[in-house]
Amino acid sequence: MKQKTKKSLSKKVKVTGSGKITRRSTKQNHYNSRATGNANRGKKRDRGFFKADEANIVKALPNA
């Protein structure tokens, strides 16, 4: 039987062309006006995962 994709996870991560998995940075929903400009620009960057976490995510996304 085919493994189903974890839909909640597939909405939170993106698989790049080279196969790496990226996610959105945290702490950017509110209270951003008091943060410095460098901090706010840093929040816009996508983040990667640790190798061990990435292996588990790949298992949960069989069709990615």
Image (cartoon, rainbow, N blue to C red):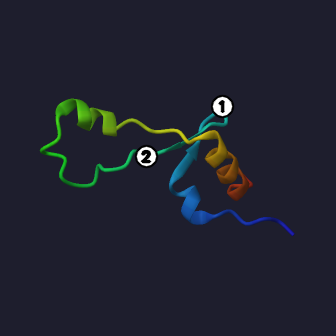
Q: Is residue 42 left or right of residue 23?
A: left
Res. 24 mark: 2
Q: Position of residue 11 (x, y in %)?
A: 52, 57
- Asked if residue 31 is positioned above or below residue 21 in the image, the reply reads below
User: Looking at the picture, which amino acid does disc 2 mark?
Assistant: Arg
Q: Is residue 30 above or below residue 14?
A: below
Looking at the rendered structure, which numbered label has been put on residue 26?
Answer: none
Q: Residue at x 68, y 52 (%)?
A: 56
Q: Is residue 4 visible?
A: yes
Return the residue at label 1.
18
Q: Secondary structure at mark 2?
A: loop
Location of residue 48 in the rendering, given as x and y in whole percent from the top left corner: 52, 39
Which residue is drawn at the image coordinates 66% and 45% (left, top)? 52
**Could you tell which of marks 1 and 2 lies nearer the N-terminus?**
1
- Count of labels in the image: 2
Task: Give the spatial CA distance, label 1 vs label 2.
Answer: 18 Å
Depicted 27 relative to depicted 2: above or below: above
Q: Residue at x 60, y 37 (%)?
A: 16
Where is residue 36? Give x, y as percent: 17, 35
Amino acid type of the residue tagged 1 in the rendering = Ser
Crowdedness of circle 1 by 10 Å Cα count: few (<14), some, many (20+)? few
Tell me the SS state at disc 1. loop
Indicate the position of residue 54 as horizontal and vertical percent values. 64, 45
Q: Is residue 18 above or below residue 22?
A: above
Asked if labels 2 and 1 touch by Cβ distance under 8 angstroms, the answer is no
